[in-house]
Image (cartoon, coloured by chain):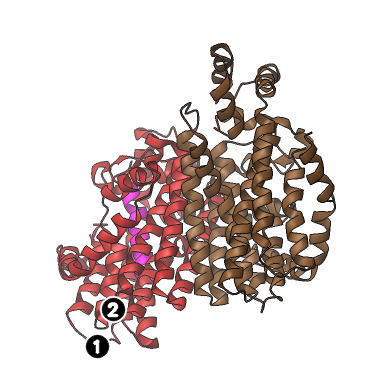
Chain colours: A red, B brown
Amino acid sequence: MTPSAAATQDRAAPDALERLVVETQPGMNKVNALILDRASSHVELVPEIARYLIDAGGKRLRPMLTIASAMLFGGGTGSEVNFAAAVEFMHNATLLHDDVVDESAMRRGRAAARMRWGNQASVLVGDFLLGQAFTMMVETGNLEALGVISRAATIIAEGEVLQLAKARDLSATRADYSNVIHAKTAMLFEAATEVGAMAGGADPAGRQALKSFGTELGFAFQLVDDVLDYRGEAGRLGKNVGDDLREGKMTLPVILALEDANPAERDIIVRALGQPETGEAELATVRAIFAKYDTLGRTSLEARRHAEAARAALSPLHAGPMRAHLADIADFTVARAY
Amino acid sequence: MTPSAAATQDRAAPDALERLVVETQPGMNKVNALILDRASSHVELVPEIARYLIDAGGKRLRPMLTIASAMLFGGGTGSEVNFAAAVEFMHNATLLHDDVVDESAMRRGRAAARMRWGNQASVLVGDFLLGQAFTMMVETGNLEALGVISRAATIIAEGEVLQLAKARDLSATRADYSNVIHAKTAMLFEAATEVGAMAGGADPAGRQALKSFGTELGFAFQLVDDVLDYRGEAGRLGKNVGDDLREGKMTLPVILALEDANPAERDIIVRALGQPETGEAELATVRAIFAKYDTLGRTSLEARRHAEAARAALSPLHAGPMRAHLADIADFTVARAY
């Protein structure tokens, strides 16, 4: 651990998430009730699959950010509850579709929905959740927020396609990677905090600050995820270590390693990349190459830079407890990587 | 052909579609330009797949109905162009996802997109088109129309899930079938004509009339499709005859046959249902059972009833050429079955 990483960890008390949970609880109770309500359907299979995913939990970080962003500006008028639930539905729709695209076996520590109900139902229930997300947005009557969310939906899909197009592409660059994670991950964080700020009545500068905060936080979050995919423990990850490698995803640790590797090392990486059969032994060899060039450390450092940028985005705003909570979440996100 | 079917065909001159094409051409030129524009993306694979599907054509019946519905009330203010393109994007998104769900090999007379680019890209480009559809709706600033479209998106997905849940379900009823096709097909026709009427400035009665027209037309359209799946020629269908049977879809021709069949016949149908390997010989046997109980004829008759209801829905409106064109489209839809 570098000294500054240690400093980050000190600053981000490990209870940063818990504190945000407590602060946003009244709003999140409404969000959770709305999520359950809108996951219902007269077609039994729909709530069965939707709730399987929803009950598996996850941190509900994105809707919590929406609620917190609204609270930062004095609390919303109620539309932040719909916005937050819509953001979570979009996220869950993306997960259902991603699992089909990635042919994933696990999600949130248990069998992916597609393993139980098939790809077919996963695609369709994802579509259902997208439809419900938009319906909840429409109910607020806020066209500007609808614009933010619908543009995000488009860009997220583009990002996923770009990631797919770049899979196993040895010429993929850092810029390609940045474009992919901006679209597929940072965009939804950005939308979550931006519409939260709008619901809270932020002025244009405040809205822009929260938007930038969300973007940077999303970058940090995905960079850390891409480190953990190689470094985490399957139990805590909720998925298998090395899945990104097996799926041929050109994440930053791989791109950095390919830049520096000698021909023999490069060969090892290339042979493991995009091979579903890549086992523990090959994975360990690849990880040793990553260690030699510190690609996970350098990816973590990049994550920390984005977390700092997230914190900085909030600095023009009036200081207060909620601003501090949000800033700490940026550090907390990065601390996961250490 | 029954005498009344012949009468229908006489009334619906085979050029009903061509006449609608001519009448809506100025609006459709704008719609087609918008479709091309919004199918573009900096991610090359997106327009490649989107245009593959779009260029394959199809009749663009749904957006044409939106334009015609607006024209019926004196023409829209421009928002009907966005509405129409959004409806077509939703339709194409559904097709991309359906092909994955149905594991279809053909669409619009050529290889389904998923056969060329894989299920993964088909799912994601479908999501992209959905996002773009909502973005185009948002641009009009018409929240009510957005509500119609977002509710339709939800219900369409529910309908597809219901169809999936009922696949190979021998206890599926006529009511189940009606629920499925109302949601998966009639809902988008209904939304297409309703938002068209709204863009044209229809009063509540006019809007309701066009909505009902769309619903009934959609029912007729799907009933005919379900007949053609057993009776059409692959070349004209753009897909393989008997696919519904192989996919285990409980369409009305099957449900009616199972109601009347003797145990031996029932056994033949059950063995062919949902078997991807069902070949020409088994299909011919099933079709012979359908012929014995006239299940395709009875399904066509049901389609005709809905076409009549579509025509009737327009009758309270001021008579004029566009009303006649729309009414003829209802007859034309059914005439496909004969």
Q: Going by the picture, which residue comes out furthest to the top?
A: B264
Specify whether residue A63 is in view: yes
Q: What element carries label 2?
A: loop
Classify the position of the C terminus of chain A by image quarter: bottom left
As drawn, the label of residue A318 is 1
Q: Does the magenta stretch include residue A223?
A: yes
State the residue in front, A37 or A111: A37
Query: What amino acid does circle 2 point to?
Result: Gly
Kindly report the secondary structure that dominates the magenta region of the rendered protein.
Answer: helix
Which mark is drawn over residue A298? none
Residue at the location (32% across, 43% down)? A239
Q: Which of B227 and B280 is in front in this view?
A: B227
The reply to the same-chain question for discs 1 and 2 is yes
Asked whether, in this view, residue B257 is left or right of residue A253, the answer is right
Q: Is residue A83 above or below residue A58?
A: below
In x, y percent, where is residue B251?
58, 34
Q: Give the range drawn in magenta.
A: A215-229
Name the residue located 46 percent from the left edge and 72 percent from the top edge. Answer: A146
Tell me the quadrant of the picture where the N terminus of chain A can be found.
Answer: bottom left
Q: Which chain carries label 1?
A: A
Find residue A156 and report its horizontal and vertical position in percent: 48, 61
**What residue sits 39% from the left and 65% below the top?**
A136
